[in-house]
Amino acid sequence: MTSIRFFSSRSFQGHHINRNEGNKSSIHCQCQVTGQQSRNLFNFSKPSRKREYSGRQLVGYSMDQMFEVVSDVENYYKFVPWCKQSVVLMRGPGHLKADLIVGFPPINESYTSHVTLVKPYLVRAECMDGRLFNHMLTLWRFSPGLKREQQSCVVDFQISFEFRSALHSQLSNLFFDQVARQMEGAFIREAGKRHGPATMQPKNLLLNNQTLKS
């Protein structure tokens, strides 16, 4: 893919958070894209390299169905945006190790991910090789959805990372939240391809602090 699509704030699915290294108690939520982002693109005086995103959705697929899609790391290259290659190097009970290549302008890099699997509740992936990231952690949690609809569940998605490169970090200001939202949506769409139509439209539970009603 050679271009990145930008979405309006109405399609916001989660929270994108920047943490300032000089003041760990200060948290600034960038829920809207402003001109300040572009003006700071090449300002390396005090780079904030940590990025975090959280999403929480009620979806019309079961915990087992969503777990099956998210844990299918070897096929990520087929449906995860900007994932060019995904190869499982080692697999054991409840864990695996995989090499992945991500590619979107101007980044085309590989990294090794250590994945913990707790069926059907959790998929946790952590990058530990340190070539592209100082750290990267992706966490998926699945919990029961509506009592009246067994084929539903709540999907909590979190991603946190810190680029080693200051340039990569500054460029990520422009596309990180869009990439994270598209990743989140890609897994739900893949569940539809594998398991058929959802029993309901995805509902963003973070929007206006909505709570789950049975």
Image (cartoon, grey):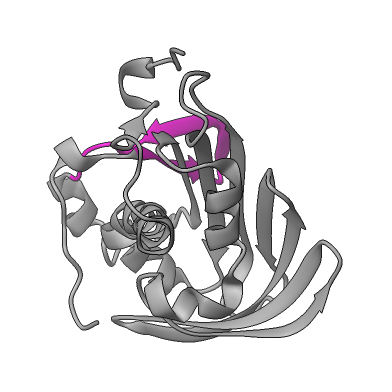
Q: Can you say which quadrant of the picture contains the N terminus?
A: bottom left
Q: Is residue 175 left or right of residue 148?
A: left
Query: Would you place residue 52 above or below residue 117 in this image?
Result: above
Residue 124: x, y in percent?
68, 55
Q: Residue at x 63, y 67 (%)?
A: 134
12 lies left or right of 124: left
Q: Is residue 129 visible?
A: no
* Towards the viewer: 147 or 52: 147
x, y percentage for residue 142? 60, 40
Residue at position x 59%, y 59% in the image: 68
Q: Is residue 87 magenta?
A: no
Residue at the image point whose x is 66% and y is 54% from the top:
123
Which is more toward the observer, 101 or 147? 147
Residue 60 locus on image (x, y percent): 40, 38
Magenta span of residues: 14-33
Side of 3 relative to 70 (left or right): left
- Asked where in the image residue 107 lies, by quadrant, the reply is bottom left
Residue at 43%, 12% (x, y): give it: 213
From what the image shows, is residue 39 above or below residue 61?
below
Query: Which image quadrant is residue 80 in?
Result: bottom left
